[in-house]
Amino acid sequence: MRDKMQMNPMRHRRLIYLAISILFLPFVSGCVTKQQPLYYWGGYQTQIYGHFKGEKAPEEQILVLEQVQERAAADNKALPPGFRAHLGMLYGQTGRSERLVEELENEKKQFPESSAYVDFLLKKVKKP
């Protein structure tokens, strides 16, 4: 009977390790900082999805994306790749070709790696 009441030394050691781990967990997790996202997405992804499903008219999408753009500027955050190009294409659908060109040029400035594709789009827009 006495043997059953005594704790197994290995089990005792495991309980001590568990208790120490539980005690130090808040200290270790408190040191971890959450990495901030590289881009401000806002409702951009939802708008892209809605665009391809045809759920909203271009004007509605433009309003939402302009709000996302304003919020990003207010928070001093960068917009994601393709944001300005998509917004420009929406402007093009509504007949505002000057804004289309402006947004495509902005996309090219922010993401120089997109230059070849943006230049291709600009040639199509500026075609007589």
Image: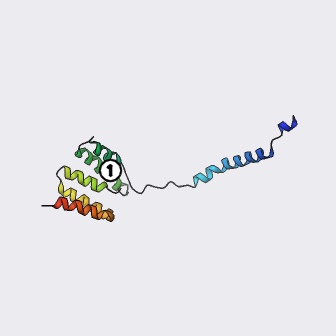
Left or right position of 23 against 95: right
As helix, strand or loop, the secondary structure at mark 1 comes to: helix
The quarter of the picture where residue 101 lies is bottom left
Residue under label 1, please give it: 68
The image position of residue 5, as x and y in percent, is 83, 37
Three-letter amino acid code at the position of disc 1: Val
- Residue at image position (32%, 45%) is 49
Q: Quadrant of the N terminus?
A: top right
Left or right position of 80 against 8: left
The image position of residue 68, as x and y in percent, is 32, 50
Left or right position of 128 against 7: left
Which residue is more in the foreground, 61 or 125?
125
Give neighbour class at mark 1: few <14, some 14-19, many 20+ (Cα, 10 Å): some
- Residue at image position (26%, 42%) is 54
The image position of residue 33, as x and y in percent, is 53, 55
The image position of residue 69, as x and y in percent, is 31, 53
Extreme residue toward the top, this view: 1
Specify the color scheme: rainbow
Extreme residue toward the right, this view: 2
